Image: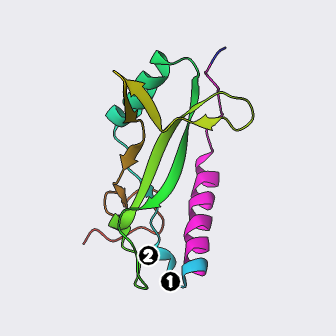
């Protein structure tokens, strides 16, 4: 089975609207300012490659699922951007939505396949990107 799926690129104006909608939604549900929303994650290519390498070794892996997570518990205070994580896990094709593959056996030992991407925006972001949102003065 060909694992390649060609999704057309999202036009930039649509992407800007989608990211703006996210910030507005986040502000509404957290009762904060839209500018305080975390915006995305910086994922190094080597981490993408690790997922691709897993899929090349196991032809049943056909996709990757992302989960939002908190690295530190939040007890009533404001959410700090650095506490937000994105976890990626390979997914095997079992029909329907597929099945997460959080562990694999290597040498008789179960090893985690879950990757933790902990570089959320705005902590590490291109603040000049039109997707980031209202531009921040560089003064």
Residues at badges 1 and 2 in contact (C-beta under 8 Å)? Answer: yes
- The one of 45 and 95 positioned closer to us in this rendering: 95
Quarter that holds the C terminus:
bottom left
Q: Residue at x 31, y 63 (%)?
A: 123
Residue 131 visible in the snapshot: no
Q: Residue at x 56, y 72 (%)?
A: 26
Q: Give SS at disc 2.
A: helix
Q: Let me know if residue 87 is in the magenta part.
A: no
Q: Residue furthest top?
A: 1
Quadrant of the rendered image containing residue 81: bottom left
- The one of 11 and 33 positioned closer to us in this rendering: 33
Which SS does the magenta portion mostly show?
Answer: helix
Magenta range is: 3-28
Quarter that holds the N terminus:
top right
Q: Position of residue 33 (x, y in %)?
A: 49, 81
- The one of 88 and 45 positioned closer to us in this rendering: 88
Q: Let me know if residue 21 is in the magenta part.
A: yes
Q: Position of residue 20 (x, y in %)?
A: 57, 65
Location of mark 1 (residue):
32
Q: Give SS at disc 1.
A: loop
Q: Residue at x 46, y 59 (%)?
A: 69
Q: Is residue 119 above or below residue 2?
A: below
Q: Say the numbered circle drawn on residue 36.
A: 2
Question: Quick check: 131 left or right of 41?
Answer: right
Q: Residues within 10 Å of mark 1 (few under 14, many from 20)?
A: some
Whole-Å distance between the Cαs marked 1 and 2? 7 Å
Q: Residue furthest left?
A: 139
Query: What is the image's colouring?
Result: rainbow
Q: Residue furthest right?
A: 96
């Amino acid at each position: 089975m060909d694992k390649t799926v060609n999704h057309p690129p999202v036009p930039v104006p649509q992407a800007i609207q989608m990211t703006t909608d996210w910030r507005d939604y986040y502000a509404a549900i957290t009762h904060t300012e839209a500018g305080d929303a975390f915006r995305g994650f910086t994922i190094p290519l080597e981490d993408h490659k690790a997922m691709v390498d897993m899929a090349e070794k196991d032809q049943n892996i056909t996709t990757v699922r992302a989960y939002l997570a908190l690295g530190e518990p939040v007890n009533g205070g404001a959410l700090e951007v650095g506490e937000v994580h994105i976890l990626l896990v390979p997914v095997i094709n079992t029909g329907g939505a597929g099945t997460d593959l959080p562990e694999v056996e290597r040498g008789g030992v179960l090893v985690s396949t879950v990757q933790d991407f902990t570089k959320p925006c705005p902590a590490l972001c291109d603040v000049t990107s039109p997707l980031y949102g209202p531009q921040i003065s560089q003064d």
